[in-house]
Image: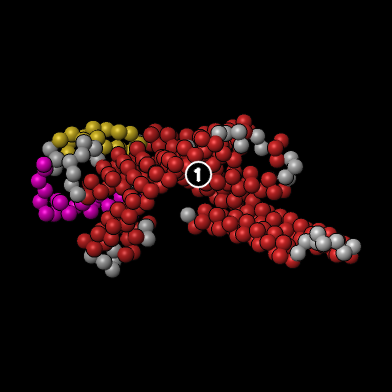
């Protein structure tokens, strides 16, 4: 076990959590602490209290990640059992797989932060290595999840707008191809970050050992590729996916309300004709109410899912 002085111990422990308040694409000391809202709280709290709160949040997130891993594993198993003859099963399985990987990556990052804070002797720099082996992938995979969510919203919208043509417009092979294209365009650019940063063994005098660390590459091409990939996959693609989800949700809600109104009008006209003929098989107002309530519940569910996505 390595021995730290009190000042060195606090510096090492706090630097582990400083990564949580820095620009996520700044590594190896390229920090910008003023860019985070968390730094505002540090002006009102002592370092010990501030980092204790952050550690509690990290521990809570770790429990949530474990639950997410278990839940998505069960979801994947269920979809595999159901088969992939339905296009929706393919897209939902891809979403569950991406969420599973996101939870694993975030668990890895939180674990490295926790171990570094408690001065566990690691053969690598916890903050930098965990970020380059998990944080970067998590950032780009979040864009993948956003586009899969947008595709699912588009798929549901097509089902409502063109119910008689949906079998021809959305096929299992087409959905599988769409998932493959989304992954290639949103997640694969994350590997460009390995051109901007590279792994390097360096000697750590505090640990008295050689550890694995990451260093930035000063090449202009590498910096340009990093900026392009971050802008496209971190800004443009999520905004486009967000716009698609908004448009599809609005169209879906409007069309569902039109269908509900049309169904009620048809049912009411039929009921009046039947009552005019004094036939006992007339539709009751309770039946119409049940149909309307069902449509309203469906609309509320769609809006709730979209709202959760917007907030996240």
- Tell me the residue at 11%/43% (across/down): 2
SS at badge 1:
helix
Residue 239 location (% of width, % of height): 55, 50
Q: Position of residue 69 (x, y in %)?
A: 39, 44
Residue 142 seen in render: yes
Residue 277, horizontal then vertical, whole percent: 90, 62
Instruction: Look at the image and say whether residue 20 sits in the magenta stretch.
Output: yes
User: Is 34 positioned to the left or the right of 184 in the image?
Assistant: left
195 or 186: nearer the eye? Answer: 186
Report the number of numbered marks: 1
In the displayed structure, 195 sits above or below 277; it is above
- Residue lying at 44% horizontally and 41% vertically, measured from the top left: 74
Residue 7 screen position, x and y as percent: 13, 54
Q: Residue at x 35, y 38 (%)?
A: 133
Residue sitting farthest toward the front:
280
Judging by the rendered image, the residue that carries numbered circle 1 is 145
Q: Residues in magenta?
A: 1-23
The answer to which quarter of the image holds residue 71 is top left
Among the 4 quarters of the image, the one containing residue 216: top left
Q: Is residue 296 left or right of residue 263?
A: left
Give the left or right position of residue 110, taking residue 102 as reference.
left
């Amino acid at each position: 076990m390595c021995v730290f002085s009190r000042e060195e111990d606090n510096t090492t422990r706090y630097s582990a959590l400083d990564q949580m308040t820095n620009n996520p694409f700044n590594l190896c000391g390229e920090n910008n602490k003023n860019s985070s809202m968390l730094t505002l709280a540090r002006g009102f709290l002592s370092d010990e209290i501030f980092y204790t709160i952050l550690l509690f949040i990290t521990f809570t997130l770790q429990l949530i990640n474990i639950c997410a891993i278990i839940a998505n594993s069960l979801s994947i198993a269920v979809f595999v059992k159901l088969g992939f003859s339905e296009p929706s099963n393919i897209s939902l399985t891809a979403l569950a797989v991406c969420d599973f990987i996101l939870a694993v990556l975030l668990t890895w990052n939180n674990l490295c932060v926790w171990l570094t804070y408690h001065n566990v002797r690691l053969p690598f720099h916890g903050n930098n290595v965990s970020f380059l082996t998990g944080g970067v992938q998590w950032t780009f995979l979040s864009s993948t999840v956003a586009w899969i969510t947008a595709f699912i919203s588009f798929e549901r919208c097509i089902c409502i707008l063109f119910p008689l043509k949906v079998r021809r417009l959305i096929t299992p092979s087409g959905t599988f191809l769409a998932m493959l294209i989304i992954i290639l365009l949103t997640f694969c650019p994350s590997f460009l970050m390995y051109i901007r940063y590279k792994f390097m063994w360096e000697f750590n005098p505090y640990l008295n050992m050689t550890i694995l660390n990451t260093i930035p590459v000063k090449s202009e091409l590498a910096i340009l590729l990093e900026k392009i990939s971050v802008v496209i996959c971190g800004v443009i693609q999520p905004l486009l996916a967000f716009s698609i989800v908004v448009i599809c949700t609005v169209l879906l809600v409007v069309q569902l309300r039109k269908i509900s109104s049309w169904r009620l009008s048809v049912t009411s006209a039929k009921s009046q004709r039947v009552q005019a003929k004094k036939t006992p098989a007339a539709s009751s107002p309770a039946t119409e109410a049940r149909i309307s309530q069902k449509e309203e519940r469906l609309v509320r569910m769609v809006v709730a899912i979209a709202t959760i996505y917007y907030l996240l």
